[in-house]
Amino acid sequence: MLKDCALRKGDWMRLGDTYEIEYQHSQRKSTIQNAVLTELENEEVLPRGALTLRACNPSEVVEIRKIEMEHELALKEREEREKGRKRQHELA
């Protein structure tokens, strides 16, 4: 999967030039990046669905990570409860 931090704006512009993709120098990196990725997907250089794999904005990434951490915590708490029950049964 492509990471946003892997390429700089100049890299995306060079890719755009290579594939003759129109962009404006004044555009944001993300706009140029999306134009390049969309065109590469349309030309079947990238597989279909490549854009959906990376289509998370930073706040969604943070929210997903928060949910993952909450899930991990819940699993650890459940594991600790089970260990506590097991110890109680051993002592009884």
Image: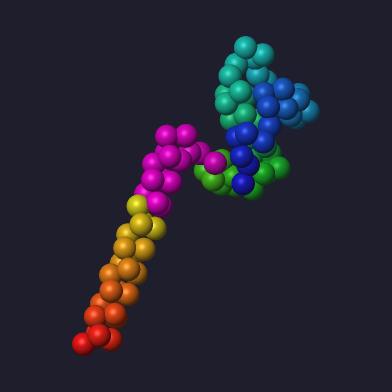
Side of 13 relative to 67 (left or right): right
> Is residue 47 at least partly visible in the picture?
yes
Quick one: which residue is furthest to the front in this view?
91
Q: Is residue 31 above or below residue 45?
A: above
Question: For residue 80: magenta?
Answer: no
Marker count (numbered): 0
| Magenta region, main secondary structure | helix
Q: What is the quadrant of residue 81 in the picture?
A: bottom left
Q: Is residue 77 above or below residue 66?
A: below
The colour scheme used here is rainbow
Rendering coords of residue 43 (x, y %): 68, 39
Rendering coords of residue 6 (x, y %): 67, 36
Which residue is pictured at 39% across the width and 45% down the height?
66
Which residue is pictured at 62% across the width and 12% down the height?
26
Quick one: which residue is furthest to the top in this view?
26
Q: Quadrant of the C terminus?
A: bottom left
Q: 80 or 91, which is in the foreground? A: 91
Q: Is residue 46 above or below residue 5?
A: below
Rendering coords of residue 22 (x, y %): 67, 20
Q: 92 or 57, which is in the foreground? A: 92
Side of 59 relative to 80 (left or right): right
Span shown in magenta:
54-69
Q: What is the quadrant of residue 54 in the picture?
A: top right
> Is residue 16 at least partly visible in the picture?
no
Which residue is pictured at 73% across the width and 27% down the height?
11
Side of 10 relative to 78 (left or right): right
Quick one: which residue is furthest to the left in this view?
92
Which residue is pictured at 25% across the width and 77% down the height?
85
